């Protein structure tokens, strides 16, 4: 099985063929949320520059097909995950129900649903609903004996007790949407991937639920953040990405030459 490589293709097909069964220690998945369908944009926004709602073809799947798609890629993840392995799945309210249903059908045990409070969430454009400022990360395990580095989780927790001592990490993570130097952008300043996740998020997941030398899998690699953080902390990694343009972006960030 090849390691430290990004497969360009459909994750369901690659999970069923290229990845060995019971070989992966930790999976982080950031699947399509299936929320595209319009071209909402905010030009001249004073708080963070021009803003466009995610509106990509890969994020437009009919509802019935989306549930089947979710079940199939999670089934593939179950096959390759070690019995003691963990899976983290990013979501919003748009696709949280499908993810939980698929995980439960495969007998995954859901340990936490982490709420990501986006401290710099975009303001409400329509003024007809409460401002959306949260996403979720579902943590589930395949079987007993999962890795959870409790003391490391306390050490890296930015929240401290009143006396400054370390404290337990809660399931509410406050961090901004990716911005500044961390955001991967084109020459004209436009974000190259619409749903790039913060390195801080991957740091918490990888350090708490894996050990040095473990293998991390990301079936929706996107711009490559999972691989970058895994590599930084001495983990091996495998990425899968269907869109060729994102593979090229991730490989450039990782310094991979074909």
Image: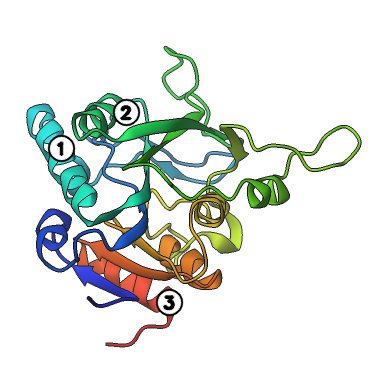
Q: Secondary structure at mark 2?
A: helix
The CA distance from mark 1 to mark 3 is 30 Å
Residue 71 — which label?
1
Vertical comparison of 41 with 214: above or below: above
Tell which residue pokes out farthest to the right in this image.
163
Which image quarter: residue 248?
Answer: bottom left
Q: Nearer the viewer, mark 1 or mark 3?
A: 1
Tell which residue pokes out farthest to the bottom in this image.
257
Q: Nearer the viewer, residue 213 or 13?
A: 213
Q: Residues within 10 Å of mark 3 (few under 14, many from 20)?
A: some
Which image quarter: residue 171?
Answer: top right
Q: Which tag, 2 or 3, sits closer to the chain's start?
A: 2
The residue located at (44%, 42%) in the rendering is: 51
Label 2, on which residue? 96
Label 3, on which residue? 254
The colour scheme is: rainbow
Circles 1 and 2 in contact, beta carbons < 8 Å: no
């Amino acid at each position: 099985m090849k390691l430290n490589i990004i497969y360009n293709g459909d994750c369901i097909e690659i999970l069923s063929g290229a990845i060995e069964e019971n070989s992966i220690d930790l999976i982080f998945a950031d699947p399509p949320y299936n929320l595209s369908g319009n071209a909402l944009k905010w030009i001249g926004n004073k708080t963070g520059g021009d803003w466009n709602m995610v509106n990509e073809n890969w994020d437009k799947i009919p509802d019935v097909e989306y549930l089947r798609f979710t079940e199939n890629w999670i089934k593939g993840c179950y096959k390759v995950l070690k019995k003691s392995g963990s899976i983290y799945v990013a979501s919003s309210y748009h696709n949280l129900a499908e993810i939980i249903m698929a995980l439960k059908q495969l007998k995954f045990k859901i340990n936490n649903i982490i709420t990501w409070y986006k401290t710099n969430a975009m303001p409400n454009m329509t003024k007809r609903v409460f401002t959306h400022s949260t996403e979720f990360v579902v943590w589930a395990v395949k079987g007993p004996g999962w890795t959870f580095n409790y003391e490391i989780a306390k050490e890296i927790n930015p929240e401290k007790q009143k006396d400054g001592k370390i404290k337990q990490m809660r399931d509410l993570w406050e961090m901004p949407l990716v911005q500044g130097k961390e955001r991967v952008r084109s020459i004209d300043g436009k974000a190259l991937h619409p749903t790039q996740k913060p390195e801080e998020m991957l740091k918490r997941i990888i350090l708490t639920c894996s050990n040095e030398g473990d293998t991390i899998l990301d079936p929706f690699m996107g711009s490559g953040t999972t691989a970058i953080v895994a590599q930084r902390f001495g983990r091996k990694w495998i990425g899968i990405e269907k869109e060729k343009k994102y593979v090229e972006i991730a490989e450039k960030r990782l310094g991979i030459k074909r």
